[in-house]
Amino acid sequence: MHPRHVALLTLALAATLVSAQTPYKPTPQQLLDGYKSADDFQARSANAVFGLEVTPNWFGGHYFWYVKNQKDRVREFVLVDTTSGKKQPAFDAKRLAAALEKKIGEKVDPLRLPFESIQLADDLKTLSFESKAKAWKVDLGSYEVTGGDPVPQRNRQGQRPRGQDGQSPDGNFTARIEGGQVQIRAKDGDWKTITKAGDYSQFNWAPDSNHLMAFRLLPGDRKPVYLLKSSVPGTTRAVLESRLYDQPGDKLDEYEAYVLSASAASEQKVPMNPIMGGGQPWSSPPGVNWWQGGKTAVMGFTIRGYQEQMVVGVDLATGNPKTLVNEKAKTFIDQGRVMLRLLDNGKEFLWRSERDGWGHLYLYNVESGSVTQVTKGEWVVRSIERIDNEKRQVWFTANGIAKDQDPYHMHYCRVDLDGKNLVDLTPGDGTHTVQFSPDQKTYVDTYSRIDMAPVHELRSSADGKLISVIEKADITGLLKNGVKLPERFVAKARDGKTDIWGIIIRPTNFDPKKKYPVIENIYAGPHDSFVPKRFYPILNMQRLAELGFIVVQIDGMGTNNRGKAFHDVCWKNIADAGFPDRILWMKAMAAKYKQADIERVGVYGTSAGGQNSTAALLFHPEFYKVAVSSCGCHDNRIDKQWWNEQWMGYPVGPHYDEQSNITNAAKLKGHLFLFVGEQDRNVPPESTIRLVDALMKAKKEFDFMIFPGFDHTDGGPYGERKRRDYFVRWLLGVNPPEWNIVGN
């Protein structure tokens, strides 16, 4: 046959296969079965997964033990020698059970020892444990059990950290704020007011037990928001509550810094205005770090607008400030990723910056004025874990550092402070958590993926070398229950170059001959990324998929942890929400998997996701057809100041109005269901209610439910049912069960 004819025949067969796929439309019984499967999913999976966690209990220099949980509540206590990686039972469970039986006169199952806590002696000769509120000790040579005394009541009262507020570090002075003034009292002395300015709101003792950094509050124009509590038991009237709540554009509290001296009873204002350049500091008082032997107070300030971050050192002897860092950005500085770590030598510190387009660490030397870039590359430092001042090394977490892996995978790394000898201590393909031994010589590395169960490895801190594989999680029971693990899927962004990552979740009774509506779980808040990366035995999205949907979750442009350019898409552009990338991703998915019906696409989300899901029907109704939006920030002027000004900018401009769901309510197409809790203390309920008002005035059809007494919520179990029913009705095209008849 001619190759051209073969190609035509192949296309015809493909078309036949596609045409053979019919939209999934369940019968009433199939639908009820789907709801039951969704509701029973967690119960069916509860005893089907083992070994998700390994918690090392370190002792004896180079040992740890852990509990291996198995089916039917069976527990095995495992001892690990960290030098060799060898495992063995921590003790003879049968002998211990028999000895304990004799002592308490009750049957003891060696597979289910009734331990509430245990402790192995460093010499491995003695085991102490608690059982049924009694303390016991067993000799691991003879297995003689002694004790049985009641466990003493523990003091659960936390101690007040010294040197942070009342008492000085040496205990010779006590400070307090009384009537807006700072008062000091020496041991056995009287209170003395040492300030004059008034309106003090916070102070911190210096390590020298003489000086204090204190802050005066310059009140802004704080205004209340109101909450109605309608259903108060025992009353016939609703209760109106109010609280102060800063919104974008409001006049905020400001703070003045002062150096106080307890011995001299003096007050000295720190002249911050010259170095601030007239900028308005952010509303919160700065945290104080002590440096150079406690002679310098180090504070961070954010200039309102989030485009300038300053680190200032205040000399306690003179009260004079010195700029240590002046970080500026054309868009925003991500406050959730600001990092400052002082070195012990009193002249250097580490600072995280995105100045080269990626979040990296920089070493500042105050004496020489030099700045060294410690980390470099197209990846992101996520946290500073510790600094080894002697070896001049920094330990940190990062994502994107493993080029052959998902760029969101978290890895633990180490590098010299001169930028040399970078080591990825966690090379396994997954996202990692690490638990270090007390001497930092070894660690347990647990890593997993959304499509791979956890692996637990013992590694050497010197070079990350594998010592032994401790455990691998067992999920065979989960898979036997028909669960299909989420699939990772990658497609190109709007620029045609950048990879967009997401996951696909299918129902357990998935039929490849059917076409299923697609539902996106959306959250496009710029403060983070949101697609799960580690293994979860149960995702709530699976419960929704059980009804006959393909459920997806995607991190589009504008979300965090992928570099500055990726993140900056959100700048003064929250309404974008990465939709161009999300739509392209779903189109690529449908091109590969014909079972995905992108003519029937729904979307749901909570909080910022509530804003995003409504925006999908306003700005992209050609693609999204149904949305369920919970407690959304539908206008960025009606939400909290610090979050919205960071991404939408300050001062408030016309772009706030242009991107508002409320302003654009008349554009609504498709089916929209709005949820809100009447007691929402995160996003004021009027954000949703004003949207309802705008939709009514535009004569739009929609659905709305307010949840009495609920805070920031998606409605809990009842809301979940209403959300399911809405998608069943408008995407599957069938009526949901009549719950008042069939029961709950």
Image: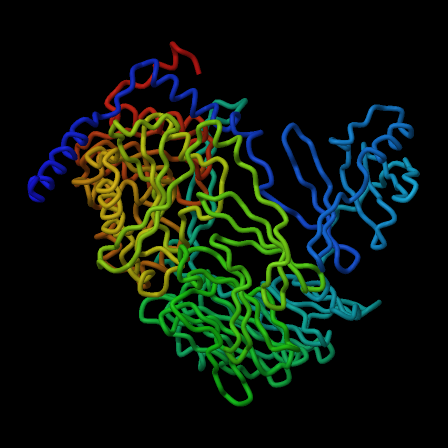
Screen quadrant of the C terminus: top left
Looking at the image, which is closer to me, 36 or 476?
476
Please name the residue shown 30% across and 38% down the image: 603
Q: Is residue 686 visible?
A: no
Q: Give the image location of residue 142, x and y in percent.
A: 92, 41
Q: Residue furthest bottom?
A: 368
Q: Is residue 706 above or below residue 335?
A: above
Looking at the image, which is closer to me, 471 or 31?
471
Residue 394 as seen in the image, left or right of residue 430: right
Q: Residue furthest top?
A: 741
Q: Is residue 118 above or below residue 49?
A: below
Q: Is residue 99 above or below residue 638?
A: above
Report which quarter residue 699 is drawn in. top left
Report which quarter residue 731 is drawn in. top left
Please name the residue shown 30% across and 45% down the image: 612
Looking at the image, which is closer to me, 702 or 687?
702
Q: Residue furthest front?
A: 1
Please name the residue shown 59% across and 37% down the image: 50
Q: Is residue 129 above or below residue 332?
A: above
Number of marks: 0
Q: Give the image location of residue 402, x and y in percent.
A: 44, 62
